[in-house]
Image (cartoon, rainbow, N blue to C red):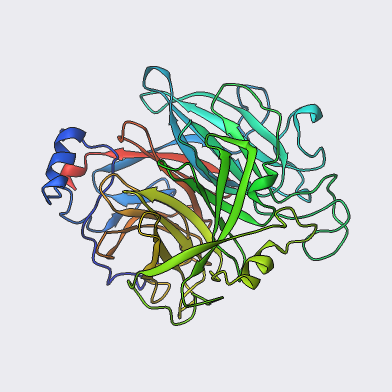
Amino acid sequence: MSLSRRNFLTLAGLSMTTGMGSISLNNLYTRLAKGQNPLSKGLGKLVRDPNGILDLPQGLRYGIISQVGKPMSDGTPVPTSFDGMASFRGKNGQTILVRNHELSPVQSSGVITKNEFKYDKLSQGGTTTVIVNRDRTLNQEFVSLAGTNRNCSGGTTPWGSWISCEEETSTPQTNETGNPNNVSVKHGYNFEVPTIRKLVKPVPLIAMGRFRHEAIAVDLKTGYVYQTEDQNDSCFYRFRPNKPGNLKAGGILEALVIEGMPRVDTSINYPLNQPKSVKWVQLEEVDPEQDTLRYEAQSKGAAIFKRGEGICIGNGEFYFTCTSGGKAEKGQIFRYNPVAEKISLFVESPGEGVLDYPDNLILSPFGDLIVCEDGAGEQFLIGITPAGKYYRLAYNRLNNSEFAGVCFSPDGQTMFVNIYSPGLTLAIWGNWTKV
């Protein structure tokens, strides 16, 4: 780890749900409600990991849950390229993790299963499901979705499933650059993966739009699904299902417009923490032959966001990252309130030494965002307090591969995160009160 990087960061306001030691969650929530944060003593320096994998603050520890190439319960090897991930409640205190594998047809190996259970027999991407015991040991691991392309991130639904998103819009004729491509069907869709313990037949959710999907989050009150797009000139989308809880039944796809600012490029000189009213415009050509959905949206006034990626919901608001947005082109995080119908820029990175290409993120029960970096050099997990203060939570000492898929166990005692390449899923826990 470079000694010149981020030494100036103030490591205050730690707010995570892993390894609470003697503090019960109920007691902790009560104290937080009164404006008290017993974990705000600061993390101090990260301690160098003698195993050369993950540096953490003193008092925290980690374990490897899953590793690329290991044989899974279904007899196939764990695929590489660990990306977006989420946790679900299992039986007897178990945690169910559903994990994306961002693999394309040109890669030599991928998610392996029978062709009749693959969306595209030529494609390598998909998801695996990992069942973790209460003591953070591996119980089962198996393929749960196969034959998709570049499954980047996704999101959970209130009815207990994972939506896996394709960040790819190739067709059997051409790929995104117009060249011949090795696929047998169109790509660029979302796929729903239940947490039941079996492989599902993939069904593309066409009505949710065909574009370079990144992540989704569902409004618990309305059932509306908010979606990000990973393009330099991407838009922010809302899907209003005909039948909440049944995404296969179709619905209406819309794009966000900032009132009084048609087609505004939010990556350039956008004001910080100034809520702006929004409206939504309906999109007609939701399944275009080419990757043109955002152009229809922008022709109707939709705002432009630079590389929309991770999204999460907490306290009734949505937070989403723009990986290379902002004056320094090192990232922004926007906040959208669906009740007030207002959007604001929550934070903007002043440089890579503070926040470098924010990607996947989650909002902890304590109100802090935990953000995965995807920059060109060193990779950190970064915490951001409600006041917009940054702190380092973990450092990837193994390599310069991105963190991805950060999530918390349902009981709030363990944080899970992936190292994208070659592929590790880690559990982090400890006694935060003694940090």
Who is closer to the viewer here, 274 or 133?
Answer: 274
In the rendered image, the vertical position of residue 314 relative to residue 261, given as above or below: above
Which is nearer the eye, 103 or 161? 161
Locate residue 279, reporting x and y percent.
Answer: 48, 64
- Left or right of 69 on screen, residue 276: left
Point 36% across, 22% down: residue:
93
Q: Residue at x 45, y 81 (%)?
A: 327
Q: Is residue 81 above or below residue 70?
A: below
x then y, percent, for residue 110? 71, 40
Q: In this view, does 41 lie to the left or right of 420?
A: left
Q: Judge whether 22 appears above or below 57 on screen.
A: above
Residue 372, picture quadrant: bottom left
Image quadrant in which the N terminus is located: bottom left
Q: Residue at x 88, y 58 (%)?
A: 180
| Left or right: 36 as drawn, with respect to 25 | left
Tell which of 345 and 129 is nearer to you.
Answer: 345
Count of numbered circles in the view = 0
Is residue 141 at all visible to an observer of this figure?
yes
* Residue 80 appearing in the image: no
The x, y position of residue 340, in whole percent, is: 35, 59
